[in-house]
Image (cartoon, rainbow, N blue to C red):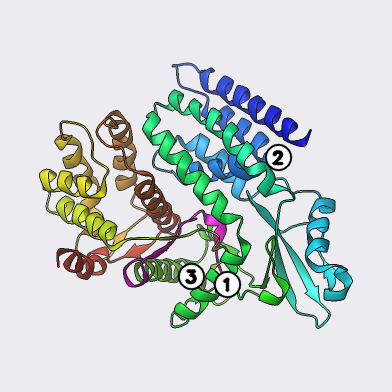
Amino acid sequence: MRERGRTRRLLGLGARTGGAVIRTRLGGQADWRALGEALFEGLSELKGPAMKLAQIMAQWDDLLPPDLVDELARLQRQAEPMPWEGIRRTLVEQYGELDTHFREIEPRPFASASMGQVHRAITHDGETLVLKVQYPGLPEILEGDLAQVRRIMRLGRWLKVPQARLDALFEELAASLRSELDYQAEARALARYRERYAHLDGLVIPEPLPDLSGPRVLAMRHVGGTPLRELELGDDATRQRIATTLADWLTEELFAHGELHADPHAGNFAADEQGRLVIYDLGAVIPVADAHLKAMMALLDAALANDPMAMDDALRQLGGRQGQGAPLALYREAAEAVVPLFQPGVQDFADVRMHRRLRELSPKVWAAMDRLQPPADILLLSRTLNGHYWNLVRLGARLDMHSRTRPLLEWARG
């Protein structure tokens, strides 16, 4: 009965969002705010893969209409929590009598996401912990939800998203969700990242507590912080420290260790009282092959040289170039849009001129998707880097990208 109820709600959501898409304002523009509100109302209740899809979409600031992005972003902050009774059952299955381990557990979560929610707990020694608790029954309903999400994603045709892109996105979504069910793997990732990046004074990663963790509960020491989105209008010095640390960490993560934190939505990051970057969630960490990194750097190298034929060669190496007829004019426009960020000296990520050019390019990119169809692994990599780029934009980062990329380009050429 529960699964049939979820299926009905998912199909109902598809009907509501489809109706929002085809309703138009004066001038023939789609009512993106109405579509976003329908998605928020339905997905914040359903959790799981449908909500995760909306969170992924919310990171595409450069592709989706602002009204739609604003509503989807609410899912990172205001999702409806799961009732305490269900969460408590999961905790009892993990710990037995809760009073044996904890003096108190707050029934209301301070964070709710697509796959679980986070509750503060206080031990008998007075230490504050956080418990990330997986939603009850999630593994059993995941596959059914994914089947319905695939049906809902057909609405992407209204946005003129090619079927190949939708299929790749779905496969990425499914793989990501299945991996996020493994809280023990996330605990190992937290421990690995804490050891690996201990030399970065500006970075904080919560300590996992294996003795209190299990397949569906991840216990960590509490690390307070101001969410990244709330820093946008805050102290500039703090924002610049956070942005520099984020850029340093991502560069080391990719080029020294061949891994990438693949869930870049802003709710996973914060600044602590000392102005250090806090990373809360490591449920999605992906390997990145040297061959992909070199091809991506070759693409950037060709763009900086304004060489559209070399850009086409790099896209073929990435597996993202198919069909006949290289869109050379599009390559030139793309190069002109990104080159200013890599000019010598400090560049401002908040410069709206670049954002405007990227938005103007988006329809042309979609129109060329018969020739530009990235495979799923490259789609995940590019989406993740795109999400981290927009986090730097939100922070108003000022970085010398020319100096940062020179040694990486030399590495790729070698």
Q: Measure how far apart labels 1 and 2 are at the Cα level.
A: 30 Å
Amino acid, disc 1: Asp
Answer with mark 3 or mark 1, whichever residue precedes in sequence: 3
Amino acid, disc 2: Glu
Which label belongs to residue 45?
2
Instruction: Assess disc 1: are there few (<14), some (14-19) or many (≥20) residues with their C-alpha within 10 Å of its C-alpha.
Output: some
Residue shown at the point (75%, 50%) measured from the top left: 136
Q: Identify the secondary structure beneath mark 3.
A: helix
Which residue was labeled with disc 1?
272
Instruction: Assess disc 2: are there few (<14), some (14-19) or many (≥20) residues with their C-alpha within 10 Å of its C-alpha.
Output: some
Q: Above or below — where is 325 with respect to 311?
A: above
Residue shown at the point (61%, 76%) measured from the top left: 207
Amino acid, disc 3: Thr
Which residue was labeled with disc 3?
238
| Residue interval drawn in magenta | 254-272
Does 393 sit left or right of 363 as displayed? right
* Residue 29, horizontal then vertical, whole percent: 45, 21
Examine the rendering and report whether any part of residue 170 can be seen: yes
Does 215 sit left or right of 300 as displayed? right
Q: Identify the secondary structure beneath mark 1.
A: loop
* Residue 288, horizontal then vertical, whole percent: 36, 60
